[in-house]
Every structure is written in structure tokens, then in C-alpha cells.
Amino acid sequence: MPPVRRSALIVVVLALGLVPLVVGCGSSSSSSTTAESGGGGGEREGGTTTVAGLQANDHGTKSVESSGKTEVELDDFYFEPTVLEGMSGEKVTLELKNEGNEEHSFTVDSQGIDKDVEPGDEGEVTVTIPKSGAISFYCKYHKSSGMAGALAVEGGTGGMTGTGTTTNDNSKGPGGY
């Protein structure tokens, strides 16, 4: 075999050998991880949980304080952090940043809050941590896709119900949807 053909054959064999490696990066298996309070967010991307009675794409829990602003990412289709914990009755200012490709809202029915945020834009709302337990917030456009979260009293369950287990179902594609 001439050297040029041999080189071409080697390149083809190597390229075909890489295909399984690249394809293997996307997993279609299911796994579960334990939900933790105080997490920074992204370590459970794509997992789902129930918070304050709503199914939510879980992107962590964060403690909030009345001094300063707390950033909340609105993306396609989750809030990060998903659970915001604070002191009972505390008023908190949230800086909403829509990092997704769709219009999203930050809606808290029990507090009369319904703020729309266009892709790439920012908004601001002031919420009140409930006196006890947790209350839900959600995107009115994508609630059925799991875009929900909770305002919860610090030290509680973070508004999560059930066993505290999140499920990561990648069979639906990236992010579990």
C-alpha cells in the first residue's frame, strides 16, 4: 500500500475511533442525587423536585439577606437559585436576570408580584419571606415546564417535599426537558 493511502487509512480509523467517545458524552441513563440546603446551584442542573407544592427544575438553594440585593437567574426553564431562604417575615430585594432566549416572569401570587423580564434584560422585585414554611414563585409562561421555586424560612426544608431526592432524567434531553 502506498504511504499516502496508508496515512489516509490511519486518519479514517482514528476518526471512527473518536465517534464513540463523542457520542458517549451524552448519557441517557437516570440517576438521583440528594438535595442539599445552602448549595450554590448548578451541581444538580436538570434534576427535579417539588418545592412549595410545585414541580421544579432544581438549581440549588441560597440564603438571602435584607441588606443588599440577591441575584436570581431566569433561564430556559429554571430559576437559579430555585429556593431562596431567609428570616421569617424579612423583606428581600431580588435582582432578576433573564439569561434565557425566552421571555420569563417572576410571579408570586400570594404577594401580588408578576414581573416580566425579556431575554437579556433585568428587573427587580421586593419579596417577603413567609412567616413560616414556604411559598411558591414561578414563571407564568413556563410553569408547566418546571420553571418554579420557593421563598422559604431559613432552617426549614427549603420548601422541598418528599424524600429530598432529586431525579435527573436526561432521557428528555439536556436539562431534563
Image (spheres, helix red, strand yellow):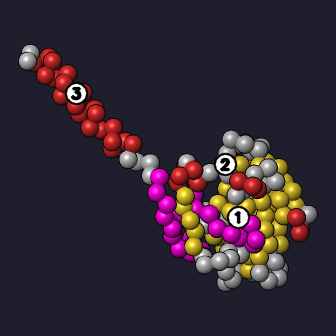
Q: To which quarter of the image does residue 19 belong?
A: top left
* Image: magenta residue range: 28-55
Task: Identify the residue shown where x is 64% and y is 67%.
Answer: 49
Figure check: 81 above or below 10: below
Q: Where 9 falls versus 56 (above or below)?
A: above
Q: Which residue is mark 2?
A: 76
Expressed as whole percent of the image width and height from the top left, the position of residue 143 reads 76, 56
Q: Nearer the viewer, mark 3 or mark 2?
A: 3
Q: Is residue 157 left or right of residue 166?
A: right
Q: Residues within 10 Å of mark 3 (few under 14, many from 20)?
A: few
Q: Residues within 10 Å of mark 2 (few under 14, many from 20)?
A: many
The residues tagged by marks 1 and 2 sit, at their Cα atoms, a distance apart of 15 Å
Residue where numbered disc 3 is placed:
11
> Could you say which quadrant of the image residue 155 lies in?
bottom right
Residue type at the position of mark 1: Gln
Q: CA distance from mark 3 to mark 2?
A: 40 Å
Q: Tags 1 and 2 in contact by the CB under 8 Å rule?
A: no
Location of residue 122 with respect to 154 vertically, above or below: above
Camera-side residue of 9 and 64: 9
Q: Is residue 47 magenta?
A: yes
* Quadrant holding the N terminus: top left
Q: Secondary structure at mark 2?
A: loop
Q: Secondary structure at mark 3?
A: helix
Mark 1: few, some, or many residues within 10 Å (few <14, many ≥20)? some
Residue 150, image x, y percentages: 74, 69
Q: CB under 8 Å between callouts 3 and 1?
A: no
Residue 4: % across, % down: 14, 17
Query: Which is nearer the N-term, disc 3 or disc 2?
Result: 3
Q: Secondary structure at mark 1?
A: strand
